[in-house]
Structures are given as C-alpha cells and as structure tokens.
Image: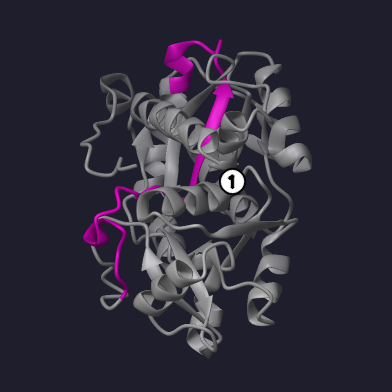
Amino acid sequence: MHFTRRTFTLTSAAFALTLAAPALAEETAFKPAKMTAFVAAGAGGGTDNFARTVQPMLEKRLDTNITIINLPSASGAMAHQRTAQSEPNGESIEFASSTFITSRAAGQNPIGLDQLTPVARMQSDVLTLVVNTEKYDTLEEFLTYAKENPGEVIIGGTHAASVDRMAFLGLNDAAGLDLAYIPYDNEGSASANLLSGNIDGMFNEISAIQGYIESGEMKPILALADERLEAYPDLPTTVENGWNLTFGNERGVFINAKTPPETIAIIEAAFQDVFNSEEYQAYAKSANLHVRPGFLGSEDYRAVLEENLAYFEKLLSLK
C-alpha cells in the first residue's frame, strides 16, 4: 500500500495559531495549569523517548506542566481508553505509535477514531527488512531462497498486531512469498533470535538497528520506501521492485475526540512549532528519525490513519 506521495497541508486553523512561544498560550483561551500525557508504550522505548524529549518543549510553548504516565499493557489499549475517557478539555493527551491503528485492525483495541482523534503526527520512521549477515548478503539471495523453500523462511517481529507483522503480511502479498512469522514480546527478543540464527529476518526501523548495522551483525536488505534513502543509497526499496508497500512506524499525539476543535488546533500548532524547532530537529537527526518527513496536522493525519486501517484490515483478511 502506498501513501507517501500524497501532498498534505496544515489546516488553516492550526496554521493561524502557529505562534512563537510563549505567545502561543498567552493569546488563547486554552491555558492549562497542568496536563497529563499517557504513553501507549513502556519506559525506554521509541515512543517513550519521543514523549519525554518533547515534554519540556511542549511545556514551554503551552506554559504548563506535563505529567507523563506509561500505560503499555494490552498493546497500549489501556492508554487509549484512559485518553478517550478523559475530560475533553485538552488537558489529557496521548503519545502513541502505529500500534494504535494496527491493534484496531486486528480487533485488539476497542477504541477507534470516533473516540480518539489525532492531534499531529511527528515521526514517520522507515521500516526495513533486516537479516543476519551470516545468512544473507543481498535481497536477491533472500528472495531466491524464500521462493525455493516456501514456508521455511521465518520472519520475527513484535507481537501479532504490530506494524512489523503488517509489513510481513504486505511483503508476502506483494511479492508472492510464503514467509512464516514468529511474534516476540519485545524488540530485544526478536533481535536476539535473529543474531542467533533462529530466524531469517525481521522488520525494524533504521533508528532501532543502527548499532547492529555499524557492527556488521545485521544488514538491512529492503526499505519500505518510494526512493532510496540518502544515507543508504545501496539499499533497494519496495517501490523499485514493483511492490506498493511504503508504510512505516509512525508516532503521533492523540486526544479525546470530543475536545473542542479550537483547543485541538492550539495543541496541534504547539506541536508543529516543536517539530520545526532546531532542538527537535537535532534530536530527530541523532535518532535517525529525519529520513522521511514526519509532521502531519490533525486532519491529514486522520486521513492517513483511515487509509492505513482499511489496508491493514485487508492484509489481515488474507492471512
């Protein structure tokens, strides 16, 4: 499925509110003394790091104090429920990844976009197919072996309703392969099994495997992208192979859907101001999160989530 060539624009309401801090909070009716940010993931992971990096930047722009609460259980479903059931006054927000929509597609998340609406997307990481360098050196080697040994090539990833599994299902469908999938409780377990040779490959983000790439223990052989990545010019893409498969792990901000639109627009504008800041861009670059454009406003992010939901439901129906 291919979503990245669509042109997105920031909504006019949010654009009008993109003001320099601290005027952003001073010139509006939304002046929360404190806010709560639920994180639909455990401490130390990519979504948690994202939330804690952004926290002081957002506090400055909204002139408030933000308390972060991690709620990783049930693939983040508890965080989604808490946010959807919060007072719709803008004082409770949620940091979540693509697991919000993949778990919804898999029927594991009772909260939909009618209860939890997006504020902004901040990151759109690139998924790659990664292999143990002792097993494969190129995509051609991997594909040849997979086609000659149907059902024997095993791909690992985090749990059964993750974006990793959606990438696995998408590649099986697009390339006409018969790969097997093993879900692991966490990324570390999947990586350990890849390094030990128990599995043939895994889907992961560039930002998460940088150390393994540099040490030569892992090698990305395929990027789910339109064009070759500037930092990895030798890495082939799905699109150049004729596979319409370009989604990745996204991280964004959500809020109770009953929150007044003007309040959502203020928070959206604050996040855009954070995204455009030198401080945030330096963080994104250091974590290799700058490879693909990240920011989308509320309306455009909703459109992407709805498209992804329909596509992931289709993939799951093919399993």
249 horizontally vs 221: left or right: right
The residue depicted at 34 percent of the width and 48 percent of the height is 276
* Residue 254 part of the magenta segment: yes
Residue 99 place in picture, x, y as percent: 59, 41
77 horizontally vs 54: left or right: right
Residue 34 place in picture, x, y as percent: 67, 29
Q: Report which quarter residue 266 is drawn in.
A: top left
- Amino acid residing under circle 1: Gln
Residue 295 place in picture, x, y as percent: 36, 42
Q: How is the image coloured?
A: one colour
> Which residue is outermost to the right?
73
Can residue 124 be seen here? The reply is no
Q: In this view of the protein, which residue sits in the foreground, 63 or 317?
A: 317
Q: Report which quarter residue 122 is drawn in.
A: top left
Q: In this view of the protein, which residue sits in the foreground, 121 or 14?
A: 121
| Picture layout, residue 68 above or below residue 289 | above
The mark total stands at 1
Q: In this view of the protein, which residue sits in the foreground, 141 or 211?
A: 141
155 horizontally vs 221: left or right: right
Secondary structure under badge 1? Answer: helix
Can residue 169 be seen here? The reply is yes
Q: Quadrant of the N terminus?
A: top left
Q: Which residue is mark 1?
A: 55
Q: Quadrant of the C terminus?
A: top right
| Picture layout, residue 16 above or below residue 273 | above
Mark 1, Cα crowd under 10 Å, few <14 / some 14-19 / many 20+, is some
The residue depicted at 57 percent of the width and 50 percent of the height is 165
| Picture layout, residue 302 above or below residue 291 | above
Range drawn in magenta: 235-264
Residue 300 place in picture, x, y as percent: 33, 29
